[in-house]
Image (cartoon, rainbow, N blue to C red):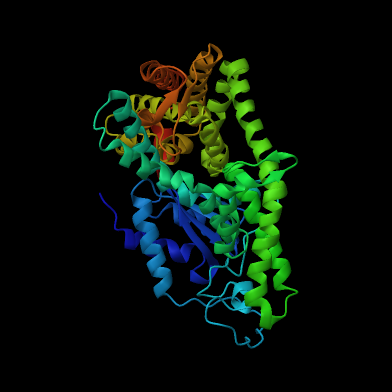
Amino acid sequence: MRIDSSTTAAAILPLVGGPANVTSVAHCMTRLRLGLADPSRVDGAALRAVPGVLGLVVDDGCCQVVLGPGAVTRVTAAFENLLAATPATAPAAPPAAPPAAVPAAGPSPTAAATGAPGTESAPAAPRPSTGPKAVLRRLAAVFVPLIPALVGCGILAGVDGLLVNAGRLPGLTPALTAVASGFMALLPVFVGYNTAKEFGGTPVLGGAVAAIVVHPGVAKVTAFGVALSPGQGGVLGALAAALLATRVEKWCRGRVPRTLDVLLTPTLTILVAGLGTLYGLMYAAGAVSSAVGTAANWLLATTGAFAGLVLGGLFLPLVTLGLHQALIPVHATLIEQQGYTVLLPVLAMAGAGQVGAAIAVYVRLRPDAPLRTTIRSALPAGLLGVGEPLVYGVSLPLGRPFLTACAGGAAGGAFVGFFAMLGDRVGATAIGPSGWALFPLLAGNRGLGETAAIYAGGLLTGYAVGFAATYAFGGVTAAVAAAATRDP
């Protein structure tokens, strides 16, 4: 049964504390991500009982409501419309001084400093930024909004590559190359924009400073005795540049006279952060990016089977905590350097273990068990790499099948890692899809057929081990399944 998105959004809003408690709204492929002023106001038990909600993660000022692919986009739009139409009583704040007259060309300094409506600055009630988990969540918030474009451009790049290799449609492939590559060429600009927005700066200033990283003119700049190259440092350089711009902007806001703020603050922000980016951050970020690529290749080439075992086995717990998106900068860095990320196919094996575990649960249950209906509806998404409906609807509520699913992911990861030790690297040219949906995006240092065969072997291994481990040790009984269905 299809659930109305407006009804779901209307049910969620009061259970997260109402409009006044929501500081930001975003979504990824399966989750509605809400920034909250007071996370303690979330009614977790009632939220989990809302029809269409598959799971819930509340931590560090962020509430992640798992809704599944497709549904999350519709519910997010309905939620944003509901927020816009619902008057919210904001928390009490000290009265602001009357704003000085400023030119109409930009936001007022007061608005930019407080995040008032109509500006591009961050909300007035920022989320916590201390602690490793909070930092990872904020990094994820920078990259999660970029996922749809990363997925779409990646798939188009894969199709373009197949056409070029096959010698088909030579008149169309240059256009496809331009369409698929445009966003990736300017990715640091979007990263800079989102970074400034997330960390309390003016987004367009963050994007302006990050644009320096990809500007062709940097080739004429020498730092530390070495000429820079456009794109050096990639997304890591853009992230650092936007963070520096945000710090400079905040420093200026507190010191520049109000009458000159609209002129001096943006100018000083771009000048100081831009020079810092050219004569420090790009060089340093380039060194870090190179180290990331070298470390990933060394890890899989030297300890491939063991590394795949660990990465594939631990990825599902990261997904349940919502921390898996924090790996996007690493994937993006590898794609910039090598043309593909060797980590994503290994991590994708966690979803294969989950699918195998769910099939074993299905087989062990009575034909009339309600949980079998849940598995049938969630399994197609799981095969396409979206495992959260199976995680939150099946294995996690049951308990032990979640662990046996991790065992399947570990086995699949070890399979792919073993071939990496033999010199056969399997990578993905874009971030987002996994499971069967990753096949069009596969790339490596061998032919496409061999690369696809290794990845398929990993999936089959994950399915088989996840199934066998769950069937033998999953502890699935009718009573346990019924209890899990009643209390997810």
Could you tell me which residue is drawn at 63 percent across and 68 percent down?
266
Position of residue 265 measured from the top left corner of the image (x, y, whole percent): 67, 71
> Residue 273's x, y, as percent?
68, 58
Residue, x 66% and y 77% (percent of image)? Answer: 261
Q: Please state if 111 lies on the left or on the right of 85 as rendered.
A: right
Q: Is residue 362 above or below residue 392?
A: above
Q: Is residue 404 left or right of residue 115?
A: left
296 displayed left or right of 185: right
**x, y (%) of residue 368?**
27, 33
Compare residues 5 and 214 and report the one nearer the observer.
214
Give the answer, above or below, for where 146 lies relative to 436: below
The tally of labels here is 0
Q: Is residue 279 above or below residue 479?
A: below
- Image position of 427 (left or right of 376): right
> Where is residue 214 shown, x and y percent of the image?
55, 47
**Which residue is at the front of the view, 252 or 52?**
252
Of 147 and 403, nearer the camera is 147
Please name the residue shown 56% across and 37% down the image: 333
Can you see residue 375? no
Quadrant hosting residue 479: top left
| Location of the C terminus (image quadrant) | top left
